[in-house]
Image (tube, helix red, strand yellow):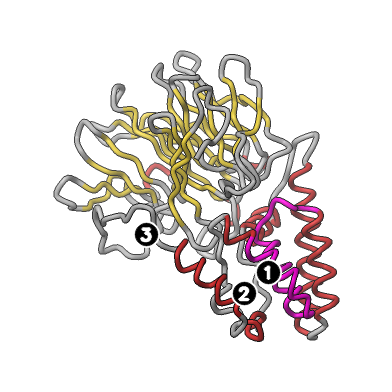
Amino acid sequence: MYLKIIGSIVIMVLIFGQMVLFSAEPTGAEKVQKVGELYRVAHEFFNKKDYNGFLKQVEMAHAVLPEDEGLSFELARGYALTGQTEKVYKSLNRLVDMDLFYDIETDTAFDYLRKEKEFIQLMEKVAQKKKPLINSIEAFSLKEKDLIPEGIAYDPVDNVFFLSSLSKFKIVKVDANHNASDFVQSRQDGILPTLGMRVDSKRRILWVCTNFGYPRANLEKELFGTSGVFTYNLTTGKLIKKYMLPKEEKHFLNDVALVDDGTAYFTDSHVPAVYRIVPGSDKLELYVSLSTHIYPNGITYSPYTKKLFVACADALAVIDTTTRNVTLLKYSEKMFIQGCDGLYYYHNSLIGVQNSILPMRVIRMELDAKEEKVTS
């Protein structure tokens, strides 16, 4: 059986394996690199069926990144494999209370417990919690199944959606009748894999993050490290401008948030930091460094408190745009709000796409009046 660290740690280890940091305090990166090494050794112990050795390595990894719930699940597996039943139930119940299930239902490490009353009750709780609070409906589907649309944006003026593409280096437009067409064709204007996007409906601009931050067989080696932002005219489809960061610094501009005055903010997942482009200066500039946070990804803006919310793998960072002060969004220990990719602000709440956990899900986080804490 293959060792499975299913949570966000897998994503973080893969991400930081190719990462070059320029922060003075790369605390998050150092932690992830350490956990990656401990994971490798744990895997070796697991393959040799040395479960005590496996558990010891996982415990050390969890001590480095206690906020990583994927490692918490691995601890539960280690406890099960070494017969520490009481700790198994304590760990699994804590995860299930946060609506994190991983492979509890199928993992063979727990097979010897499945007929026990306490485990049966645990599985009943899992079944109950797996029921969605709200069921979704399909908006539209595409025939192009290999598009890998990492980003999505909506234009309320023309009533169309835009989908980015990690695999085909283009942007697809879907109209009100669900007809899909290429808004930007593959490699047009030198565009690379496309990620986060936002529509400025007032100024008729589509903002697009485009990067080549990971080695790929079908892309030229000399493009590795290329990262930037392209802007397109929504009416004509023509390229307006490219904003590129130095290739040798290995940036990775991931997602974008817009402010009413036309300012655009971008997460840089590899440095890590937030950049911005202000109307008038028309220059991509460093706005805030996020050296202690891991892999800033989704980003959104509240016009009411003038705060940026940044989804990191280990937290939700909050940036006050009047002071540039960075804090962390507060939440109950019984909630799991980390691991969001896409992030959107909506009526005093945040909507997050959590795709680094199981089950993957969309969550809505209600905020307090000052937008400092998740209340539910």
Q: Do the residues labelled 1 and 3 touch (CB within 8 Å)?
A: no
Q: Mark 3 points at which residue?
A: 147
**Of the residues tagged 1 and 3, which is closer to the observer?**
1
Going from the N terminus, do you reach mark 2 or mark 3 first? 2
Question: Mark 1 falls on what kind of element?
Answer: helix
| Closer-to-camera residue (213/61) | 61
Query: Residue 252: horizontal and vertical position, in percent?
Result: 58, 43
Going from the N terminus, do you reach mark 1 or mark 3 first? 1
Question: Residue sitting at 50 percent across and 15 percent down?
Answer: 281
Q: Note whether 170 is above or below 246 in the view shown.
A: below
Query: Residue 291: horizontal and vertical position, in percent?
Result: 72, 36
Q: Does residue 63 show up magenta in the picture?
A: no
Question: Residue sitting at 66 percent across and 86 percent down?
Answer: 112
Question: Residue sitting at 84 percent across and 77 percent down?
Answer: 52
- Name the mark on residue 118: 2
Q: Mark 1 points at which residue?
A: 89
What amino acid type should be assigned to the residue bearing mark 2? Glu
Q: Please state the extent of the stretch shown in magenta in the rendering.
A: 64-93
Give how far apart the Cα atoms at labels 2 and 3 are: 44 Å
Q: Are marks 1 and 2 in contact (CB under 8 Å)?
A: yes
